[in-house]
Image (cartoon, rainbow, N blue to C red):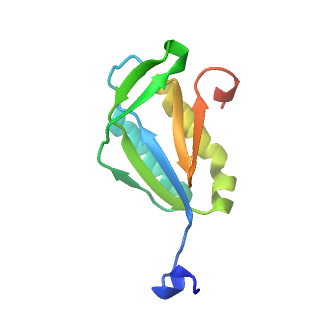
């Protein structure tokens, strides 16, 4: 079968999907500077990968296992960004640094990211949170 890009004669095709979640509250339920972090994420993804789209706030919950499995309800922005494996590998450290910075500044237990079908989580405490 012909590549999908050739069907429409498109000039660019990317097949790696990144999905970021921009929190509305911290792990104590206090409001975050969500608009600031959403805009910062859009700028970063635009610079690193050529663009991104933020979707209206959703509704979600995450379990804070470090705090007795307390449920934290949230209204995250969901940001989609298409890229490719090569660019993702080359720019992963910049993306990770942003996620860690956001996670610490917004007092998160962890920051989640989806790459294609894989959910990836960066804990804000312990060895995995080092920038």
Q: Is residue 25 visible?
A: no
Q: Is residue 21 visible?
A: yes
Q: Which residue is at the front of the view, 46 or 17?
A: 17
- Classify residue 58 as left or right of residue 8: left
The relative height of residue 70 versus residue 50 in the rendered view (above or below) is above
Quarter of the image with the C terminus in it:
top right
Residue 27 position, x and y percent, is 43, 20
The number of discs equals 0
Hey, which residue is sitting farthest left in the picture?
56
Hey, which residue is sitting farthest top in the picture?
68
The relative height of residue 15 versus residue 8 in the rendered view (above or below) is above
- Classify residue 17 as left or right of residue 70: right
Q: Which residue is at the front of the view, 117 or 102?
A: 117
- Classify residue 126 as left or right of residue 5: right
Residue 61 position, x and y percent, is 39, 30
Toward which corner of the image does residue 62 lie, by quadrant?
top left
Quarter of the image with the N terminus in it:
bottom right
Toward which corner of the image does residue 36 lie, by quadrant?
top left
Which residue is pictured at 39% across the width and 16% down the height?
28
Residue 93 position, x and y percent, is 66, 44
Which residue is pictured at 64% across the width and 52% down the height?
91
Residue 10 position, x and y percent, is 48, 82
Which residue is pictured at 36% across the width and 51% down the height?
54
Toward which corner of the image does residue 77 lie, by quadrant?
top left
């Amino acid at each position: 079968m012909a590549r999908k890009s050739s069907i429409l004669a498109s000039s660019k095709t990317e097949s790696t999907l990144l999905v970021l979640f921009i929190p509305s509250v911290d792990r104590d339920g206090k409001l975050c500077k969500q608009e600031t972090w959403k805009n910062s994420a859009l700028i970063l993804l635009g610079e690193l990968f050529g663009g991104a789209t933020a979707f209206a706030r959703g509704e979600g919950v995450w379990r804070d296992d470090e705090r007795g499995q307390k449920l934290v309800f949230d209204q995250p922005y969901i940001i989609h960004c298409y890229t490719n494996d090569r660019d993702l590998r080359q720019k992963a450290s910049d993306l990770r640094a942003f996620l860690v910075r956001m996670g610490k500044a917004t007092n998160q237990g962890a920051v989640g990211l989806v790459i294609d079908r894989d959910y990836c989580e960066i804990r804000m405490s312990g060895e995995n949170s080092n920038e």
